[in-house]
Image (tube, rainbow, N blue to C red):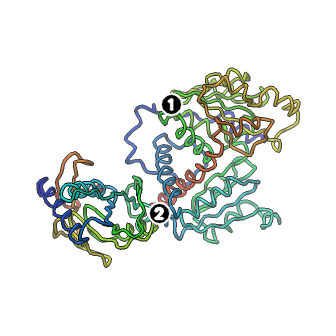
Amino acid sequence: MTADEIRRATVRLSHEIVEKQAGTEGLALVGIQRRGVPLAHRIAAAIAEHERTDVPVGALDITFYRDDLSLVAQQPVVKGTDLAFDLNGLTVVLVDDVLYTGRTIRAAMDALVDFGRPQAIRLAVLVDRGHRELPIRADHVGKNVPTSREEIVHVHLAEVDGEDGVDIDRISAAVGAAG
Amino acid sequence: MTVVRDVVADPPIPAVPSVDDAPETQKIGWPHRHLLDLDVVTWPEIELVMRTADAMREVLARPIPKVPALRGRSVTILFYEASTRTRVSFEVAAKNLSADVVNIAVSSSSVAKGESLVDTVRTVEALGADVLVIRHSVSGAPALAAETFGGSVVNAGDGWHAHPTQALLDLYTMRQRLPGGSVAGRKVAILGDVLHSRVARSNLWSLTAAGADVWLCGPATLLRGFERWASVGAAGRRFHVTSSVDEAVRDADVVMALRIQRERMASGLLPSLREYAARFGLTAERLSLARPDAIVLHPGPMNEGVEISPDVAVGAHSVITDQVANGVAIRMALLYLMASAGARRAG
């Protein structure tokens, strides 16, 4: 995906999210660390532009909820959770860059319900690359990208990586670069 | 106690990398299976503990201050010495991470029947402990336990030797309170019964690694061995020894009072507690020599009116209750880092 494609997908996600909620009332966006957080802010900015309303945006770090601590090659560095609003009764849209096995989303839902009882939890992702290992699907998808398990999907966002873009590497060429 | 003196007098003093050119810490992992003291813990690793503790403080501020990170792990707390805050702090920390916690009260265990430390450690391991948190009156006891134990050992204070989690929570509290969030270049005065203090010894490692200007102060009889340690010097470490309270406290950014450890005190070291309090106690008058925004720490429990006057202990400069609260976050961070290091080994 190019920077333009990411921008258009983000704007479309913002419209879909508002359409599904039939407005912005009771809506909140929660980005999953790390690249879900800038994505959530971009979607919120797009909503602010076409709906003239600011929706609350939070950040969720799921490090302490992972079920694969021993599989993470490098020590996961905790980036922090920031949920400065009350989740009770809200429709919370989780935002992440890539949906793959679904384990991150499982952990994110566990983390989220520790903060309160949302009316509903939805999921928006920039890229769905398939290969789910849990019964989880995204409500809003920027782009479906068929991949094999031997590939790694890299999402670059200007806020984190200095530029926008999505590319796919073979695992052998990308060992150590996985995020 | 000759063993203790050997440990204290001639520690290897590694050079410290300058705080300024600390490497990119994002990729630093926690490599240590055990935590016995801070001498082998590098500055980037200490910073990793500090950052992880930041995340733990966020967890502690949640409506439900509990995460499942250590679900299914067993933490055994084995204390051969009396303790309130350290023992409870470890227990709360482990429970906040969803670990299973076993507390062994030595007075009502088989230790009272004469079971040796090594046998107790073997028993605890056979009962499924992954992490052993141990406090013992003999220096080196946790190191002995680590030789036997198959999991991770955390030293919660051994004799005169080390109390690494206390030093880390002290550093964390200082960084939290000092403008700029750094102790580099700050004057830290550690005042009191230095000789018997494992807290002072562990703090020496972490504070000098952090670039602080550390002043140890107490009666000459309670500074034995430290003059030599200070005179050896090491690249990048600033460390002074004095018996003048005024010299130590003047312009200090941090003043840490240490408890007079009567239970470890051989006779003849101090003429009397009253004289000690008069000459070395941290009073408001002495504290006025420090910087106006100086902070006061004490590892607890306090002998109020001896090493610290009651008005200073609860005064505006005191961060003693912050130390206790931060202790839980620091211990959560360490248990989490050590468990994930252990998971990597197993996996």
Residue depicted at 80% across the width and 35% down the height: B306
Residue, x 70% and y 21% (percent of image)? B246
Instruction: Report the side of B239 relative to B235 (left or right).
Output: right
Answer with left or right where residue A169 lies relative to residue B295.
left
Label 1 packing within 10 angstroms: few (<14), some (14-19), many (20+): some
At a point 59% along the width and 54% down the height, the residue shown is B328
> Residue at image x 66%, y 52%?
B156
Q: Earlier in the sequence, mark 1 or mark 2?
A: 1
Q: Position of residue A60 (x, y in %)?
A: 38, 59
Q: Tell me how many marks there are.
A: 2
Q: Nearer the viewer, mark 1 or mark 2?
A: 1
Residue A29 visible: yes
Element on which disc 2 rests: helix
User: Above or below — where is A148 with respect to B292?
Assistant: below
Q: Which residue type carries mark 2?
A: Ala
Q: Position of residue B50 (x, y in %)?
A: 50, 46
- Residue B184, which numbered label? 1
Q: Residue furthest bottom?
A: A135
Q: Amino acid at mark 1?
A: Ala
Q: Position of residue A46 (x, y in %)?
A: 20, 56
Q: Which residue is mark 2?
A: B343
Q: Nearer the viewer, residue A19 or A169?
A: A19
For mark 2, name the chain.
Answer: B
